[in-house]
Image (cartoon, coloured by chain):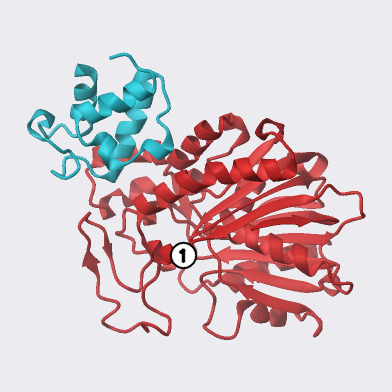
Chain colours: A cyan, B red
Amino acid sequence: MKKIENILKEIRPEFDFTESRDFIIDGLLDSFDVITLVTELDKAFGISIDGIDIVPENFASIDAIAALLKKKGVVL
Amino acid sequence: MNLTFKNKRVTGILTVVPAKEVRFEDEMGNYNFTREQSVKLQKIMGFGAHRIVDDGTCVSDLAVFGLNHLIQNGQLKKEEIDALIFVTQTPDFMMPATSFIVHGALGLRHDVYCLDINQGCAGYLVGLQQAFLLTEQANINKVVLVNADILSRKVNKRDRNSFPLIGDACSITLIEKGSGSEQPVYSTIKIDGGNSNVLTIPAGGMRLPSSAETAIEEQDEKGNIRSKDNLVMKGDAVYNFVMMEVPPMIADLHELAGKEISDTDYFLFHQPNKFMLQKLADKLKVPYAKMPFNVVEHFGNSSGVSIPTAITFNLAQELRSQEYTVCLAGFGVGLTWSSMLLKLGNLDFCEMINY
């Protein structure tokens, strides 16, 4: 979980991701940030997140991102 | 719609790109991004340089330049042209059709069949399908297919969604009747007109003619600046459409042809950006070496011309002397998604030139 948080901080250092309940609705991540996040997660965990899974709800919180990674077989 | 064509040959492909190259680094200041965001996006999306026409250059200029290049080099005899198809979203005029302008500029025979098609990212596939259909006629042996777009003139330079990736280009493809020994060409096409507003230029047609009012620039909620005269792309919707529809389309195409995806030598897809193509390759389990995704980086996404640009940039030499099984796929405005599986190679010419 810490690894996910660190990646998020690297993408948008100006935001505190622990304070938000929905990164998309709260405006912490836009669609370009999500693409950057996917690329960083793919690299960090040695996976390729399916294109079809790149939808806002899968990146709305650290828990949602963790669930997506678990779906790809990542053990957190 | 599934389509099968017999006794068809593609005999040459030429791409014409504007010599003027504009680099993403020089445009970063136009967009509502921090420099750090821009640099990251540059790597992920593959933004590099894009080719842009000078003001005043039209698609017919690129096409006539390319056709004269082929005629002067003896690769095309104008008296052998039986049909001319011109696929574009950026015609010279509302009327006459651009194919007529090219017909006049080249002084073609009066019995040449001329046809304009308004198509975008799937325009190479639609153009090939129409060319194959025309060669069913006894009097039509050789078809010239021109794909050309200069969308840089319709995209706002401060639209970060679209301008960094847009490119201008023209391609000329020759299609002929085969000798009878060719393998069938398999193709698919689907349309979703209910989502035609996902990629649109709102003003400039009869529904909303261009005016001083439609030229007023506005900022959207994401910080993109554009007017109603400019192209609007709902990037998220386009992305979702591509990821939902393209992988099953490619699987269905191979099933139609009775082939495995692994049997195909190259996947020459429309070039929206590097990220999307890598995701498609991953989903289809296609090695990146079989699916070029370097067109946006070097030339920009030239809509219906991006597939021939990918071909002439990556495989020009090989396709002049060898033959490969290739899978073409185009997807975008319409919405349209189309694919084709064919043998391509031993071409009389396969080249890219600067305008």
> Which residue bears the numbered disc 1?
B151
Q: Looking at the image, is B120 positioned above or below residue B118?
A: above
Q: Going by the image, does A54 lie left or right of B183?
A: left
Rendered-image quadrant of the C terminus of chain A:
top left
**Could you tell me the amino acid type at mark 1?**
Leu
Q: Looking at the image, is B185 positioned above or below residue B148?
A: above
Question: Considering depth in this image, is A16 or B147 the residue closer to the camera?
Answer: A16
Q: Quadrant of residue B131?
A: bottom right
Residue sitting at x 51%, y 31%: B282
Q: Going by the image, does B139 lie left or right of B58?
A: right
Residue sitting at x 29%, y 78%: B214
Q: Quadrant of residue B68?
A: bottom right
Of all residues, the one furthest to the left in this rendering is: A19
Rendered-image quadrant of the N terminus of chain A:
top left
The reply to whether residue B354 is visible in this rendering is: no
The reply to whether residue B114 is visible in this rendering is: yes
Q: Going by the image, does A13 lie left or right of B68?
A: left
**Crowd tier of the residue under label 1, counting other residues whose Cα lies within 10 Å: few below 14, some 14–19, many 20 or above:** many
